[in-house]
Amino acid sequence: MTMASVRATPEAEDAAALVQRYQQRIRSELLKKVAEEETRAPRWRRVPVTRAADIKGGSLPVRERIVLVAQTFSEPQQFVASGLALALISTATSACILLGSPGILPAAILAGLVAIVVLGVAHPTRWVVPAVTASMALLQAALATLNADATLVPGLAATLGLIATAFIADRYGLACRREQHDRESARRLIDDMQPVDQESGVLKWPHASLVFDRELARAQRYGYPLCLLRVSMDHWESSRINLGPERAAAALGEVGKLLVKSSRIVDVVAYHGDGQFDLLLPDTPDLGAVVVARRIGDHQSAHPGIRVRVGVAPVVKREGSIDDLLNEAELAVATARKLNRSYAVYGVTKAVATAQALAPAASRS
């Protein structure tokens, strides 16, 4: 029995390590793929650029170059979204304005055309571009009607060009905003897949939960001592607002460095978010965890208003999940905050405090 149990221990650990390495490899491959997609231009922008490079390179015959140019101009979505249509229509409209507007008025209408392009791409509000386009188009149409001579045709063409420019600028701006949204989504996905939190400098909880589950199952199966420390930063929401983004990130990094410094190489530090850290201490009895909790709780932060409280939750039974252990550690933190102490042990500190509160009443009676 003893030899079988000894053989079972490394086999179980090897199986868990194999699963962890497999998940890390899959995660790294997904991360690499997302990073490549994030740095790559979208298809509607990449295809015209590739075709332009092929045409300019001179490696293709003249007939194939003509076919590539025709394909680029025959695909409306790529033609509009790539910016080619906006450049062509705005240039043609500018020429019509110069030919169809007398005196100094072309400068004003050209300024209106520039405003239509800029506002159409930026799209600050819904009504600005239609209002500017309508006013410029009416002015250009009035000028073309009043000067019913050789400038009538280019004047009316300029009016239609202003309307078309507004529409194409809006479509191009929509494509640019969609591209920016896709890039931001890819960046958020990359950040979520990163195992280490940038501000705290420790593992994120989704990436550390597998190790937590494995160590808890190992302790419950073989009777090894295990303790969990929940480290909570008091009033973190208000402290983050008072400190500002940079100093709040520095405060998180300070607590993360403290936990890493207070742990061994086999210990696991994880960040839950909202100023909540977890420190898992494998092969550590209650007294050893209390020593670590006292050291962490006595830390004086360099940032004003930052104070940490530690809740200790030892594994005392061979059942329950990691969520149960986290809840016990959170209750210990609440007990420490209620008693105004730097740390508390689940199931112990509360009993001691109750006995101390009942002792004066018993002596008086």
Image (cartoon, rainbow, N blue to C red):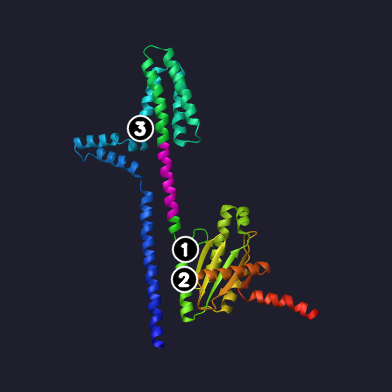
The image position of residue 79, as x and y in percent, is 33, 35
Badge 2: few (under 14), some or many (20 or more) residues near its Cα, within 10 Å? Answer: some
CA distance for labels 3 and 2: 57 Å
Quadrant, the N terminus: bottom left
In the picture, measured across the screen, residue 334 lies left or right of residue 123, that is: right
Q: Earlier in the sequence, mark 3 or mark 2?
A: 3
In the image, residue 332 sits, relative to residue 79, either above or below, namely below
Secondary structure at badge 3 equals helix
The amino acid marked with disc number 1 is Pro
Q: Is residue 268 magenta?
A: no
In the picture, measured across the screen, residue 157 lies left or right of residue 201, that is: left
Question: What residue do we see at 65% from left, 74% from top?
Answer: 350
Q: Which residue is mark 1?
A: 206
Q: Nearer the viewer, residue 208 or 201?
A: 208
Magenta-highlighted residues: 172-189
Badge 3: few (under 14), some or many (20 or more) residues near its Cα, within 10 Å? Answer: many
The amino acid marked with disc number 3 is Ala
Q: Which residue is mark 2?
A: 213
Secondary structure at badge 1 equals helix
